[in-house]
Image (cartoon, rainbow, N blue to C red):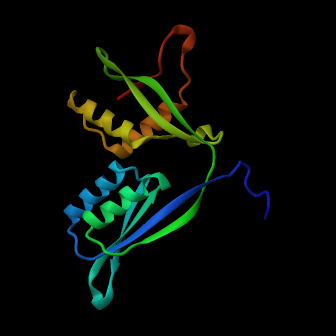
Amino acid sequence: MKGMFLMKIYNKPGQLFLVQIDHLSGEIIGDVIESFYQAGAKNVQVFSTITKKNRPGHVILIDAPASVTEAMEDIIVMECGSSGWHRIDTCHRHTDVSCLAKTIRIRISDDIAFDFPIRGKQIADDRQGIRPEYDSCAALQKELLNYQKRISIRKLQSILTQAFLLEDLEENNEIPEIHL
């Protein structure tokens, strides 16, 4: 099977923390997730579980660099109230990822338009697979509310995906325009 990937695969050391909890409310779990991110976690996921005696519970999976191990463990103890957890040293595998940024013009009507910066990610050379960042979609959704326009994040993601595929009109010093 060697050579199946058409792109280069890279390795870097990583670590995962697994924390089992069955005593925190959803509101507190949401706050704990934010605490992990603020302390340097790269990704946090929560899985619903059924524990012993059929109690509902959760497993929190935290992907964090070694440089923030102590901060992650402080949150596990102080915020989760856990007295035990698993820390697993891993090998994080990844491909080339490019972070892209461009400005597009959003046209609401003939006389209303504004320029808006967007960000996205592209894996390797896959131009058709560019994905806009959630933050760009959410920021545009919020901005559109100022113009009494409500568009779902899902639809904005599709619109911004197409915006990344529009070629800049550099010879006329124009930026791509999206009509909403």
Relative horizontal placement of residue 43, taking residue 3 as reference (left or right): left
Percent x, y of residue 15: 50, 61
The picture places residue 106, in percent across and down from the top left corner, at 36, 24
* In the depicted structure, whether residue 28 falls above or below residue 115: below
Residue 151 in the figure: left or right of residue 63: left
Q: Residue at x 53, y 27 (%)?
A: 166
Kindly give the residue lying farthest to the right in the view shown: 2
Outermost residue toward the top in this view:
172
**Which quadrant of the structure image shows residue 178?**
top left
In this view, the residue in front, 150 or 23, is 23
Outermost front residue? 70
In the rendered image, the residue lying farthest to the bottom is: 53
Question: Is 91 above or below relative to 172?
Answer: below
Residue 62: give x, y in percent of width and height.
42, 61
Q: Is residue 159 above or below residue 81?
A: above
Quadrant containing the C terminus is top left
